Image: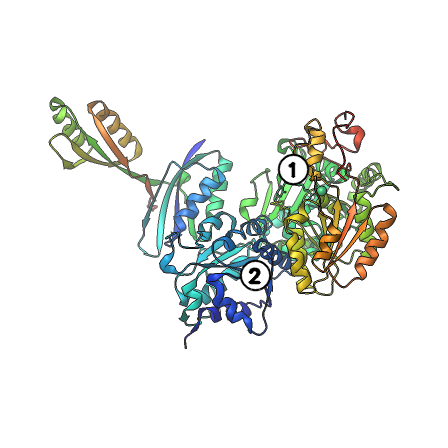
Amino acid sequence: MKRHTISVQVENKFGVLSRVAGLFSGRGYNIESISVGETLDPKVSVMTIVTRGEDQIVEQINKQLNKLIDVIKVQDLYDVDHVEREMVLVKVAPPQEQKAEVLRLTEIFRGRVVDSSPKTYTIQITGDESKIEAFLELVKPMGVKEFVRSGKIAIAREKSKS
Amino acid sequence: MKVSGAEIVVESLKKEGVTHLFGYPGGVVLNLFDYLYDAKGIKLILTRHEQGATHMADGYARCTGKVGVALVTSGPGATNTVTGIATAAMDSIPIVVLTGQVPTMLIGNDAFQEADIVGITRPCTKYNYLVKNIDDLAPTIREAFHIASSGRPGPVLIDLPKDISAGMGTFNWPEKIQIRSYNPTVEGNKKMIEKAVDEIAKSKKPVIIAGGGVILSNASDELRQLAELTQVPVITTLMGIGSFPSTHPLSLGMPGMHGTYYANMAIQDSDLIVAVGMRFDDRVTGKISAFAPNATIIHIDIDPTSIRKNVHVDIPIVGDSKNILTALNEIVKAEQKTQWGQIRMAWLKQLDQWKELRPMSYTYSDSVIKPQYVIEKLYEATGGDAIITTEVGQNQMWAAQFFKFDKPRTFLTSGGLGTMGYGFPAAIGAQVAHPDKTVIDIAGDGSIQMNIQELATAVVYELPVKVAILNNRYLGMVRQWQEMFFNERYSHSGLDVVPDFVKVAEAYSAIGLRAERPSDVEPVIKEALKIKKPVFMDFVIDWKEKVFPMVPAGAAIDQMLFDEEEAPKKKESKKLKAVK
Ligand SMILES: Cc1ncc(C[n+]2csc(CCOP(=O)(O)OP(=O)(O)O)c2C)c(N)n1
Ligand SMILES: [Mg+2]
């Protein structure tokens, strides 16, 4: 089973997300994450879908996505040089003596404190998956109350002519 | 100039060439029905159930190649179409279903007779629409017909809120349509086509397996040309029946679970399969890992998702069957070297031996009517010149096995979904399209009761549809499985009360005829065919009869069971009593 990040350009229309999600649930494909947003052309959205499967299943997923009437373009980034980013918002409630450590870690990970209360910090970290996982691992022992992840977005790298 | 939404809908349908639609009224479509009351050049056939309407639209589409249309109300009217839509989707049939919807303002309110039919049908339509702006009406209908009938065809649903059909707007008929995200591939890849010809020329034991795609793309002539030029035998799947003449010497009949011995043997022994417009359904392949172990597979299909979905494919060719077969034939004709007859001699001889060893057969009886005998007599009496529809179960398989089909669009059956209740309304739809043709639904006593109410439709519109009920007083196919694989535990497969179909026909002002002995069969058929009215023919058949050959579920397709003796040992069947 390989993990594939698939970037799907769709018509920005009512019901499209449900068509894509329905395709995955109806055919028993797995979705690890999905994120959707507008593009340069406001009539087009891009969905970044992370899925996992044997080659033959992933081939089907790509073809089935292409077959949806509202799908304009499907790009499987598996064999394409690309940049992936994800964001996490983590609410930590560290004991008094570890507050400084949380802030230090945030700095090391180039994160930001986006909200704070007498007992908690809410920290924003952006990066690829391994960076986010690493940060979560480190702060978990210090009292993570909750976190929310954005799901991955991805874009192909521009080919540089050398 | 502003016109009513109802006028836009109906005039758009007329521009799409629609002359008949099948429908049922209700509150939110009254404006549409009002416009249809005296609209010229378009006729609504009032059915007795919305499921009937969708199957009629489907039958109409299958036998004409045109888009079939149904019009129903919101809520229960809309939900009643779902089985018909799913049936059309599984078999790639172009229909457009127009459903009424509560006024836009009320959508999402659980309003009276509101159902989210766009949500409900999303997985079983090719595409669907909710029209929210009256000015989008005409373009939406144009697009819907285009999507339904192009590429791999399928059902499209348009949900029409009451305020849209009742409102006033502009009739924006687009002369051309461009959907940037929808461009089906129709021309096959040249290199692949050349490779395919090389493989066909190299092969010692090739078979063509033709499916419903050949019929949908009107490619029967091209298929026949390819088979004859290259001397490759042709197997037709259930959906492909009629795409190649069953009476042709190169025809091997149907493959799979209830396929012919020689078709299944040919596939298993073949070194090359040319699959055209078929999708390797599990009823065709049997145990997939044991399917055609030695064959190179060329797969021609308009839908890329059909390719490599179930079986490994060596040469995929995406595109329209007609175009691709034409291109194949051109290359074959240009090259003069191959002595096709010569290189196929041994293979065709082998196939003849298999045909002789186990032809399609049954044991005739002169005391009790055998269903296969009824089908043979129907074939003889019509000379094969008929449109045959079927229900689902044993009746469907016997029809497929024992009637002979030489022309496309003459065998209409629910292959993918296997919908009991399909055949009768589909026959009515076909009769609407071809008023002068003989149209016969080969039915089971169970299935016919699923849409029997449509007899009223046939009577009212003077559609002389014939129904041949193979009456075994059982859900026969279920009974067959229980006999063979569930120790004869006949759980809920006996139809203890079967209505008197002759009286049912009479109650609807149609004609009912009954055959109880083999000698009645021919006279009943001949009489029925003379009557210019709908006729129910009730054939009281041998309830013990089973469909053979049979490949048990999960077995390889050369592991066929034949009549009794080969079937799993049978105990005395005392538990089983025939219901009179
Ligand atoms: C709507 C629907 N419900 C259930 C089934 C499952 N099923 C398949 S064949 C069959 C029996 C059909 O009985 P009948 O119409 O009498 O045909 P026979 O097999 O006896 O010829 C059933 C219940 C089905 N195919 N469709
Ligand atoms: Mg029956």
Q: Nearer the viewer, residue B36 or B491?
A: B491
Frontmost residue, A97 versus A58 = A97
B137 horizontally vs B37: left or right: left
**Residue B94 located left or right of residue B238:** left
Badge 1 and badge 2 in a common chain: yes
Residue at 71 percent of width and 44 percent of height: B498
Residue for badge 1: B285
Ligand 2: image quarter = top right
Of labels 1 and 2, the one closer to you? 2
In the rendering, at what x and y percent does residue B378 appear? 80, 52
Q: Chain of mark 2?
A: B
Which quarter of the figure is the C terminus of chain B placed in? top right
Identity of the residue drawn at 38% across and 41% down: A49
- 1 or 2: tag closer to the N-terminus: 2
Q: Is residue A33 above or below residue B154?
A: above
Question: Percent x, y for residue B487?
Answer: 70, 26
Above or below, B125 relative to A96: below
Q: Is residue B327 visible?
A: no
C-alpha distance separating marks 1 and 2 = 38 Å
**Residue that extends furthest to the bottom in the rendered view of this protein:** B1
What chain letter is assigned to the residue under label 1?
B
Q: Looking at the picture, how far across and down is residue B434, in whole percent?
A: 69, 64
CA neighbours of label 1 inside 10 A, class few (<14), some (14 to 19), many (20+): many
Which of the colour schemes (rainbow, by chain, secondary structure, one colour) is used?
Answer: rainbow
- Neighbour class for label 2 at 10 Å: few (<14), some, many (≥20)? many
Give the residue at mark 2: B23
Name the element at disc 1: helix
Q: Amino acid at mark 1?
A: Thr
Residue A134 in the image: state x and y as whole percent.
Answer: 26, 28
